[in-house]
């Protein structure tokens, strides 16, 4: 397959106080999120001046991609669009068509399988084509999930090893450190149905492929940390954060704050928090971790260290180029876990929309 443009595809965020509520309403439209939850989250954004750092992070990433991709043999134009804030999908897709592009390869700032991290982007991209009457005239494919790609994991590996080393150098032994790999909680039902239907029995419930991919990534990071740091007796686990929805609905657990309390109870003196579920330091990371989880830890007398996300790290951007080269230059897929390399095209019924079925791009059956 040859492509004539790349789309850096992301979530979006507000860039001023007036944009906060419209953004939150867009994100949660039809998702049954209680009003009180929206108000609570709006305070997190307001505490940051109504500005999410996510767009600036994507601008920096876009610049880095434009800098590094040509050196990796990729010389097609790169655009950027968001699902929930400007630059919106529909506007950018229209511009890309006007600029003459007909086959687009989207790379999404989400490494894992779930409705929120995959199908919802593919539904919204289809809708953007439909809004511009471009269905059948323009093709959008999507780069596969990259949770076990070395470009994504290497920055986490280095940062986690550094964090453990820093804390032990302060005199806290590894046996008293807990490494918490954290990701966005999702409803149990979204976890159970994540990944291709044909592989569902492979994965433990309720987390499904979503949790299995995170566990595989966490294990790879711990194996790598062991190469440079003494890890005998170092405990680690996968935890969840930023739970939303109605309290009556089950979401993946344990919550990071409960996990911090538990490890403190069991004698830990420090927590290293690895935001494995996120590619950059957006609001979920700087508010829910650097404020809330850090406060939970300090209330319990624990040393708290949050490691960096890949962001615009050169190794990550080079990894994105390698993922794109799998599609345009027949590069051999790299995958460090036995779960991968994940499929290039999503199976029918993969990460379904549990409310109503909507048309999508980049599915096995997409014919245009
Ligand atoms: C799996 C996942 C990712 C990772 C994959 C990916 O990156 O896509 C992610 C990323 C993000 N989530 C973000 C923000 C929000 N997520 C919300 C709500 C929700 N997230 C969910 C899941 C995920 N979310 C779910 C199941 C909901 C409930 C509503 C629903 O079922 O859809 C809400 C509504 C308020 C609330 O309920 O918290 C907000 C404001 C931002 C931007 C932060 C910024 O502005 O810097 C980012 C990158
Ligand atoms: Fe979210």
Image (cartoon, helix red, strand yellow):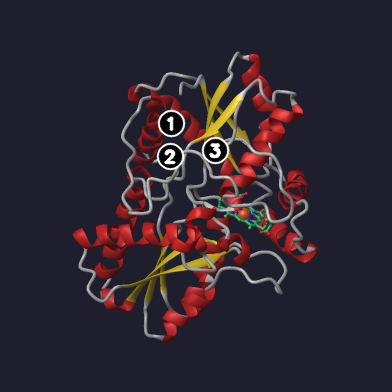
- Residue drawn at 56 percent across, 62 percent down: 191
Q: Which residue is mark 1?
A: 64
Q: Nearer the viewer, residue 351 or 78?
A: 351
Q: Earlier in the sequence, mark 1 or mark 3?
A: 1
Instruction: Estimate the spatial distance between the alpha carbons at disc 2 and disc 1, rounded to whole Å.
Output: 7 Å
Indicate the position of residue 148 as horizontal and vertical percent values.
Answer: 37, 50
Image quadrant assignment for residue 338: bottom left
Residue beneath label 2, please?
A: 312
The residue tagged 3 is 364
- Report the residue at 69% width, 71% height from top: 249
View quadrant of ligand 1: bottom right
Counting other residues with Cα less than 10 Å from the Cα at mark 1, is it few (<14), some (14-19), or many (20 or more)? some
> In the picture provided, is 176 more to the left or to the right than 211?
left
Picture coordinates of residue 102 (x, y %)?
Answer: 59, 19
What is the spatial separation of the Cα atoms under label 2 and label 3, in whole angstroms? 31 Å
Secondary structure, mark 2, is: loop
Disc 3 crowd rating (10 Å Cα; few below 14, some 14-19, many 20+) is few
Q: If you read the primary sequence from the N terminus, does the residue marked by circle 2 or circle 1 appear first?
A: 1
Residue 187 shows up from this direction:
no
**Number of residue marks:** 3
Q: Which mark is residue 76?
A: none
Ligand 1 lies under 8 Å from the Cβ of mark 2: no
The secondary element bearing badge 3 is classed as: loop
Callouts 2 and 1 close, C-beta under 8 Å: yes
Q: Position of residue 98 (x, y in %)?
A: 66, 15
Comparing 366 with 94, the one in front is: 366
């Amino acid at each position: 397959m040859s492509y004539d443009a790349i789309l850096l595809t992301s979530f979006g965020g507000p860039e001023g106080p007036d944009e906060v509520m419209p953004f939150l309403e867009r994100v949660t439209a039809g998702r049954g999120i209680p009003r009180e939850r929206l108000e609570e989250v709006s305070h997190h954004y307001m505490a940051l001046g109504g500005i999410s750092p996510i767009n600036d992070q994507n601008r920096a990433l876009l610049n880095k991609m434009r800098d590094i991709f040509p050196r990796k043999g990729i010389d097609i134009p790169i655009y950027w669009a968001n699902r929930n804030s400007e630059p919106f999908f529909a506007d950018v897709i229209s511009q890309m068509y006007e600029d003459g592009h007909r086959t687009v390869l989207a790379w999404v700032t989400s490494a894992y399988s779930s409705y929120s991290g995959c199908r919802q982007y593919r539904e919204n991209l289809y809708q953007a084509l439909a809004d511009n009457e471009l269905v059948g005239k323009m093709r959008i494919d999507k780069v596969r999930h990259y949770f076990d790609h070395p470009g994504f994991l290497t920055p986490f590996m280095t940062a986690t090893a550094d964090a453990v080393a820093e804390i032990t150098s302060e005199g806290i032994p590894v046996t008293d450190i807990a490494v918490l790999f954290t990701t966005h909680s999702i409803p149990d039902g979204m976890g159970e149905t994540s990944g291709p239907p044909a592989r569902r029995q492979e994965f433990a419930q309720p987390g499904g492929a979503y949790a299995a991919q995170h566990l595989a990534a966490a294990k790879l990071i711990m194996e790598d940390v062991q190469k440079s740091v003494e890890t005998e007796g170092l405990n680690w686990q996968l935890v969840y954060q930023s739970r939303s929805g109605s309290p009556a609905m089950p979401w993946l657990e344990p919550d990071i704050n409960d996990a911090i309390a538990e490890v403190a109870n069991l004698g830990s003196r420090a927590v290293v928090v690895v935001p494995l579920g996120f590619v950059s330091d957006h609001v979920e990371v700087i508010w829910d971790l650097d404020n809330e989880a850090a406060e939970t830890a300090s209330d319990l007398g624990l040393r708290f260290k949050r490691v960096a996300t890949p962001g615009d790290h050169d190794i990550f951007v080079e990894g994105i180029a390698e993922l794109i080269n799998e599609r345009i230059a027949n590069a051999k897929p790299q995958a460090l876990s036995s779960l991968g390399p994940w499929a290039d095209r999503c199976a029918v019924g993969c990460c379904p929309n549990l409310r109503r079925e909507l048309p999508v791009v980049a599915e096995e059956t997409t014919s245009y």
